[in-house]
């Protein structure tokens, strides 16, 4: 471990660079062997991620031959974001989702902007590469194309949970929340903060199981340290008040398990309300002011709110408490939702 840490400090020197790929693959081999014994420590992943981010190198075990991936360019993307598009593809006879990341190849690899995006991308690859759970989207590998880096995942046939609910309005929403909470609890137990929980990042597979996706803002955490980005673009409505105004709370602007719990509460509200939080407020600045004053969304009513019992609403209210220290833990959320699920007809 100390040798790897020394290499991180030396990656700017030419003498260390030829050694790094071998060390990366060696650590990757060790981590995968320990995975089989359920004993691989988060620190090992963190060292491996830092080495890869510093050198722009990924473990060979992540790579998949471009010849094994089929994507029809004539078919448009199923989703798109700031620097990536998602397409449907085929790999070894199975449907897969292919996230094509093009931005990092359009600018100089030495620019600060490119390095920031590379870290964002590597973070998602690493979390999904080494964290495996039924309620977390499965990573298949990466394919390096001439114009893009492609990250391959299992195909989620129902798409986003909001799309699933539109097609299945009578679906058990408490069960979907339990899926989400179970995945979140697993992440927190393994030292990972998601950092961008919202319904757009919850997908549903062919067995109608909800899975957490999109870990670009996530972070490995251990020994009271958290390595994460602090951008809030597109996430304000799900962002905890201590992140919106850290100075007033006397904290660092760093995502934590408690801020994940706050975002979970907003996502739960989304699932029952079938709308984004504070949908009646068009500007994010106004949302920030409301959240700072302690305002939260009203309790949903109507057909979509079936299953939203008084105890479940109390749970959501505790999860978005303005004081992060008073929020329910992810483990407690799972137990509460298990109890609620027993009361909801299938």
Image: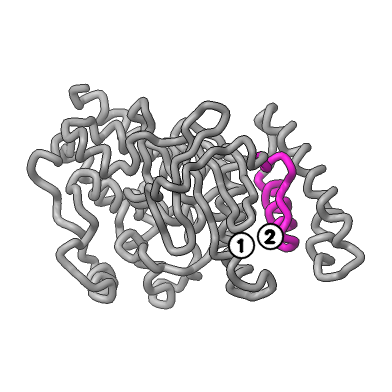
Q: Nearer the viewer, residue 139 or 246?
A: 139
Q: For mark 2, does the 10 Å Cα neighbourhood hold few (<14), some (14 to 19), or many (20 or more) residues?
A: many
- 210 on left or right of 341: right
Q: Nearer the viewer, residue 215 or 317?
A: 215
Which mark sits nearer the N-terminus, 2 or 1? 2
Q: Position of residue 93 (x, y in %)?
A: 53, 26
Residues rendered magenta in the picture: 42-64
**Residue drawn at x 30%, y 62% as measured from the top left:** 237
Indicate yes or no whether the magenta region holds residue 43. yes
Task: Classify the position of the C terminus by image quarter.
Answer: top left
Q: Position of residue 155 (x, y in %)?
A: 44, 36
* Tag 2 residue: 53
On residue 213, the disc is none
Which image quadrant is residue 63 in? top right
- 339 on left or right of 232: left
On residue 118, the disc is 1
Q: Position of residue 156 (x, y in %)?
A: 40, 36
Helix, strand or loop under label 1:
helix
Indicate yes or no whether the magenta region holds residue 340. no
Q: For mark 1, does the 10 Å Cα neighbourhood hold few (<14), some (14 to 19), or many (20 or more) residues?
A: many
Q: Nearer the viewer, residue 188 or 194?
A: 194
**Residue drawn at x 71%, y 60% as measured from the top left:** 56
Helix, strand or loop under label 2:
helix
């Amino acid at each position: 471990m100390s040798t790897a840490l020394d290499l991180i400090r030396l990656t700017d020197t030419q003498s260390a660079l030829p050694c790094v790929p071998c060390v990366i693959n060696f650590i990757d081999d060790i981590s995968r062997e320990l995975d089989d014994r359920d004993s691989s420590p988060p620190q090992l992943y963190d060292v491996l991620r830092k080495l890869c981010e510093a050198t722009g190198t990924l473990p060979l075990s992540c790579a998949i031959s471009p010849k094994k991936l089929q994507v029809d360019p004539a078919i448009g993307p199923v989703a798109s974001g700031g620097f990536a598009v998602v397409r449907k593809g085929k790999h070894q006879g199975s449907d897969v989702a292919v996230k094509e990341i093009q931005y990092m190849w359009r600018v100089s690899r030495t620019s600060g902007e490119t390095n920031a995006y590379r870290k964002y991308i590597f973070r998602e690859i690493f979390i999904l590469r080494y964290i495996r759970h039924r309620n977390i989207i499965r990573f298949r590998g990466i394919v390096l194309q001439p114009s893009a880096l492609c990250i391959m995942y299992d195909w989620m046939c129902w798409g986003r949970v909001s799309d699933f609910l539109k097609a299945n309005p009578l679906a058990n929403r408490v069960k979907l929340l339990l899926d989400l909470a179970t995945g979140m609890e697993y992440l927190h137990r393994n030292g990972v903060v998601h950092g961008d929980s919202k319904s757009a990042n919850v997908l549903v597979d062919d067995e109608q199981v909800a899975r957490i996706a999109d870990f670009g803002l996530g972070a490995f955490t251990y020994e009271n340290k958290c390595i994460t980005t602090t951008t809030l673009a597109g996430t304000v409505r799900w962002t905890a008040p201590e992140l919106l105004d850290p100075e007033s709370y006397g904290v660092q602007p760093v995502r934590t398990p408690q801020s994940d719990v706050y975002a979970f509460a907003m996502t739960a509200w989304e699932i029952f309300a079938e709308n984004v939080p504070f949908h009646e407020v068009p500007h994010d600045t106004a949302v920030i002011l409301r959240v700072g004053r302690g305002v939260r969304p009203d309790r949903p009513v109507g057909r979509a709110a079936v299953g939203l019992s008084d105890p479940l609403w109390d749970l959501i209210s505790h999860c978005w408490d303005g004081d992060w220290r008073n929020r329910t833990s992810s483990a407690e959320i799972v137990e509460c939702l298990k109890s609620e699920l027993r009361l909801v007809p299938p």
